[in-house]
Each structure stands twice: as structure tokens, then as C-alpha cells.
Image (cartoon, rainbow, N blue to C red):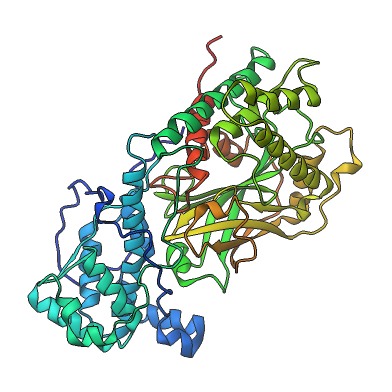
């Protein structure tokens, strides 16, 4: 298991306001959701880019920011992620935001407003999770308390500088930030009562678009019941599935298998942000990342199973942010995606029951597909779940696997199985192969049990691999839209291109070992993409799976 060491802070400019924060003090994390805004509050349009971008284009805007120390000093979403990871000091961010709000440069003030808009979303998410997940094992999104304090003189100065931006959206955001405690003015209602700010404010909402968050209990009346009845049984199922698979393969087989046990891994991956990527993504990731790894797999629980049997191809992509994939990176991109835009189960209990009934090695009779299917469907008669739901789940799985079995690797499209919270927004992600477009057809080798992985490995050895990563922001912040396919047809952005140089795969390579040793857990302070919706179930299942996989066999 990877042990997360103390990591150095990301490079950033020094604070323009002299301060000596106590960096040994414990971080204070946002508490209950009592101060969270009501769910009926609408979201604001994103704050406009700096005027420089409109006049000189993206490259020109970057050059102007790089040449402006005050603009460079304004905290961004990368600093907010640093707060989550514990690599950036809260008081330092507060000081730099304070200096930005007092700046005579309208661009600096507007950039500070953009950061506060995202910080409000992070804070709201943290408070919602604190309230919703109390008494459960769900992993909460944590964010330290952030308060930019202004004394009476600073308050008047900041109000004047804000008014001089002539930007209603920035005014709306600062009024919201003041009302919700992110900015502390003296007196408390100074911004709201300031005549120039009152003249500039508009009825438009100030919240970040796509940040509202509408997570609701699934299969239960409360999140506490959901954990008890939908997740805990799922954790028991995945443990049984891993142990049963190992035992079926003999005494020498470790507890090292689970879903997507069979795969090939590659390293030296790069991540290059696309020109159309939003500014917040560029702030968070920079123009590019290196040192990544990619694993391509089938959905087999048993590594001995032929990949010519029906399965659902998947991909796992990992990149370090601010370090390397050796444990030194304070945060990671760690994403998985599978073929097919829908998932066959809506809870951890049903998903892992499907795995246990359909994928775990069985005897010559009990392992027959019709017997497995009947047992899985009728199992709902003697426990939780519905027969009709399980039949629908199997139909969905058959449709997706049949489609995948007809395709060559470059024809696959890989979709996230749940939504993510990243940069203050709720999003869906997907991947597709850009090049090469000449992977072999594995169906030409029906007797080769590794035909699909071999065809993929051979193609990457010759031509490398380029994947396009797309992102769709969910306008209502509703993570369940992903599973309901309500997100299809929404505008999507090509976020980045992920590239692998030509290389052979090796089961003993650093990439293979990393994917074997580091369980995929799509949430936590060290992840910039935090799983939501069905993802909160998958976080728990993956954590459990990782613990079982690395447990020595007792028999």
C-alpha cells in the first residue's frame, strides 16, 4: 500500500502582505452545514475572463499574467486544492486574497473574486458532506475554513476597488462571499450597504454554475440507511468475491484479484491541456503534466478467464500533481472509465452481487451462463433487491459487452461510471482513442485467451497511444444525471490529450507494480477528481477491495 509522505508545497509567488502564519497549527475544517445556502439558490454564470484575453487571445493573456506580479500572486483553484492536500497554508492564501481585494488593478480584484467563487463551492460541498454523511463510512470532501478579514479602513478601500471594476458579477460574488463568511468586513454589512456596490449588483445568482450539488440517498430514505443497507452488504460481497476467486485458483493464488484483474500497464504518459480547456483547469493542471501511467483492462475477476469471453473493457489513468507517482505527489488525477455510457447497477450492493454471481469462478454446472443468470435474478426473491431490476441490469451488461466484443480497441469510447466534483463543479468525463486507428481485430484469433490485450499491446508498441479526454459540466450540479444519461447532448469540452510513447508492456514494470500496489480510490484529499453519486459507493468498495487484495491468505 502506498504511504503518503509529507510533501512539499507547490511553487507559488510570495505573499505581497507580510505575515508569519503558524504553519504548525492544525487546520480547521468547515463544520456542519447550518450556514450552507438553500438548495433552491441558482448558480451564477462563470466570471468573465480578464479583458486581456478578449483582446489579445489566450497566449497574450497568459503573457500578461506572467508579466504581472500582482496577478501571479492571486490564489487560484490550485491553491484551494493545496489547502485540501495540506501543502498550502490557509493564512497565506487569506493574506494574498486580502491583498488582491485591495489592489488598484481591476484584473487582480476580478481574479480574486473568481477564486472566492470557487472557494464558496468547496466550502458548501464540505458542509453538505459533513451533514449528509454523519454516522456513515462515506468519504467526505474536506475543506479548511477560509476567512479573508478586512478591518474598517480595508473594507472601505476594498469596496471602492470592487466598484471600480464595474463588473456586476464580481460584485455579486463578493456580496455572496461576505454574506457567507468567506470575507469578513467591518462592519458586517458594509458591502451590502455600500451605495456604489448596490448600484452595480444584479439579480443574477453568484454561485459557481454546476456547483449546487443535489446528491440524494439512493435505495434508502437517508444517507445513514443507504450506508447500512446498500454499501455495507456491497463491502461484504466484494470481500467474498476476491477470496472465492483466489481459492478457486488454488493455494498459490493470493487475494490479489477483483474486478478488472486482467490488464496491461504503461508508463511515461503525458497530459496536455487542450486550447479549449477552461481557465480554471489551466490554473489547476498547468499546460501539461508528465510522469503518468495508463492501465488497460478487461472486466474479468479471474485472470485466467479468456478475454474472448464477454467482458467490459476499462481504462485507468493516473497522473501526479506536484510530484511523482512514487508517493511524493500530494495530489493525483486517478480516473477509471469503461466502455458503454450506462452502468448496470446503481448501488454497491447490487454491483458487487452481480460480480459475485456472474464473474467469480464456479463449477462446471454452476458456472454456466444460464445458471448464473437465473441465480442472480432469483436471488432477489430471498433478499433485498428486485428481480426485474436484476434482469434489467443483466440486459444492460449484455448490451455493453456485446458492443465491446465487436469493436477493436480504437473503436471503444470510455465513460466515467459516475460524476465527479472537480474545481468546484460537478462533471462527467469520457475518453476516446485519437490514434493510432489501426489496432488489430482480436476476433480473428478466437482461440487466443489474451487476444484483446495482445492486440492492444501490439498496437501501442508500434504506434503509442493518444487519448482525447472530454468533460461535460452538469448544469444543475446533479451527479445522478450521469447514470440517468441526462447529461448526453450537453455541451462538452475537450479538456486534454493523454499520450503514451511507443512501448512494450511488462508485468514487472514500474507501471504494472504501481497499479497492483495502489488501489483505485476515486476520492479524498489527495484526489483532484472526487467521485460523487454512485461514486461514493465505489470509493468504499475500492478501499475495501484494496485492503483485501493486499491481505495474506490465512488458509
Q: Is residue 508 above or below residue 128?
A: above
**Residue 450 percent coordinates (x, y):** 79, 35
Q: Quadrant of the C terminus?
A: top right
Q: Residue furthest right?
A: 444
> With respect to residue 254, does 170 lie above or below?
below
Q: Residue at x 51, y 31 (%)?
A: 546
Q: Is residue 138 visible?
A: no
Residue 11 found in image quarter: bottom left
Q: Does any portion of residue 38 appear in the rendered image?
A: yes
Nearer to me, 550 or 490: 490
Q: Residue furthest top?
A: 555
Q: How many marks?
A: 0
* Residue 488 location, quadrant: bottom right
Horizontal side of 463 relative to 472 (left or right) equals right
Q: Which of 145 and 304 lies nearest the eye of the viewer?
A: 145
Left or right of residue 529: residue 384: right
Percent coordinates x, y for residue 189 in the rendering: 15, 73
| Image x and y of residue 19, in percent | 14, 64
In this view, 465 is above or below 60: above
Q: Residue at x 49, y 46 (%)?
A: 325
Going 67% across and 44% down the picture, which residue do you hit? 314
Q: Residue 547, how many percent across, how many down?
A: 48, 27
Amino acid at each position: 500500500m502506498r504511504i503518503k509522505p509529507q510533501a512539499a508545497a507547490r511553487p507559488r509567488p510570495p505573499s505581497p502582505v507580510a505575515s508569519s502564519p503558524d504553519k504548525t497549527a492544525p487546520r480547521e475544517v468547515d463544520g456542519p452545514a447550518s450556514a450552507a445556502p438553500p438548495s433552491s439558490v441558482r448558480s451564477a454564470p462563470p466570471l468573465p475572463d480578464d479583458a486581456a484575453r478578449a483582446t489579445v487571445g489566450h497566449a497574450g493573456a497568459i503573457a500578461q499574467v506572467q508579466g504581472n506580479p500582482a496577478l501571479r500572486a492571486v490564489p487560484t483553484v490550485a491553491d484551494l486544492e493545496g489547502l485540501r492536500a495540506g501543502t498550502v497554508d490557509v493564512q497565506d492564501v487569506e493574506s494574498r486574497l486580502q491583498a488582491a481585494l485591495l489592489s488598484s488593478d481591476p484584473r487582480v480584484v476580478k481574479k480574486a473574486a473568481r477564486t472566492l467563487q470557487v472557494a464558496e463551492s468547496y466550502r458548501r460541498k464540505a458542509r453538505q458532506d459533513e451533514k449528509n454523511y454523519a454516522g456513515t463510512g462515506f468519504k467526505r470532501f474536506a475543506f479548511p475554513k477560509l476567512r479573508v478579514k478586512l478591518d474598517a479602513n480595508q473594507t472601505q478601500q476594498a469596496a471602492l476597488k470592487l466598484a471600480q471594476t464595474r463588473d456586476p458579477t464580481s460584485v455579486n460574488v463578493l456580496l455572496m462571499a461576505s454574506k457567507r463568511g468567506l470575507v469578513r468586513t467591518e462592519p458586517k454589512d458594509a458591502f451590502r450597504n455600500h451605495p456604489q456596490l448596490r448600484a452595480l449588483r444584479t439579480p443574477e445568482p453568484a454561485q459557481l454554475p454546476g456547483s449546487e450539488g443535489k446528491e440524494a440517498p439512493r435505495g434508502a430514505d437517508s444517507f445513514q440507511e443507504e450506508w447500512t443497507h446498500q454499501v455495507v452488504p456491497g463491502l461484504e460481497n466484494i470481500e467474498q468475491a476476491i477470496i472465492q476467486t483466489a481459492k478457486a485458483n488454488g493455494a498459490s493464488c493470493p487475494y490479489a484479484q477483483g474486478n478488472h484483474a486482467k490488464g496491461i500497464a504503461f508508463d511515461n504518459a503525458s497530459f496536455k491541456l487542450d486550447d479549449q480547456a477552461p481557465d480554471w483547469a489551466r490554473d489547476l493542471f498547468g499546460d501539461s503534466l508528465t510522469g503518468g501511467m495508463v492501465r488497460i483492462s478487461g472486466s474479468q475477476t479471474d485472470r485466467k478467464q479468456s478475454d474472448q469471453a464477454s467482458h467490459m473493457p476499462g481504462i485507468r489513468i493516473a497522473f501526479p500533481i506536484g510530484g511523482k507517482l512514487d508517493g511524493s505527489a500530494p495530489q493525483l488525477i486517478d480516473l477509471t472509465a469503461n466502455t458503454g455510457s450506462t452502468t448496470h447497477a446503481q448501488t454497491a450492493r447490487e454491483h458487487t452481487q452481480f460480480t459475485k454471481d456472474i464473474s467469480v469462478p464456479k463449477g462446471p454446472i454452476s458456472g454456466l451462463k444460464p445458471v448464473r443468470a437465473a441465480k442472480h435474478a432469483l436471488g432477489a426473491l430471498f433478499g433485498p433487491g428486485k428481480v426485474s431490476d436484476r434482469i434489467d441490469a443483466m440486459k444492460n451488461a449484455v448490451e455493453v459487452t456485446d458492443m465491446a466484443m465487436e469493436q477493436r480497441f480504437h473503436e471503444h469510447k470510455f465513460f466515467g461510471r459516475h460524476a465527479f466534483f472537480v474545481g468546484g463543479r460537478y462533471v462527467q468525463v469520457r475518453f476516446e482513442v485519437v490514434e493510432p486507428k489501426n489496432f488489430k481485430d482480436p476476433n480473428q484469433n478466437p482461440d487466443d485467451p489474451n487476444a484483446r490485450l495482445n492486440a492492444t499491446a501490439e498496437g501501442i508498441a508500434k504506434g503509442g497511444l493518444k487519448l482525447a479526454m472530454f468533460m461535460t459540466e452538469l448544469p444543475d450540479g446533479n451527479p445522478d444525471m450521469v447514470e440517468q444519461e441526462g447529461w448526453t447532448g450537453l455541451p462538452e469540452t475537450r479538456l486534454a490529450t493523454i499520450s503514451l510513447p511507443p512501448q512494450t508492456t511488462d508485468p514487472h514494470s514500474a507501471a504494472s507494480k504501481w497499479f497492483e500496489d495502489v488501489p483505485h480510490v476515486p476520492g479524498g484529499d489527495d484526489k483532484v477528481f472526487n467521485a460523487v453519486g454512485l461514486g461514493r459507493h465505489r470509493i468504499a468498495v475500492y478501499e475495501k477491495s484494496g485492503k483485501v487484495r493486499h491481505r495474506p491468505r490465512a488458509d
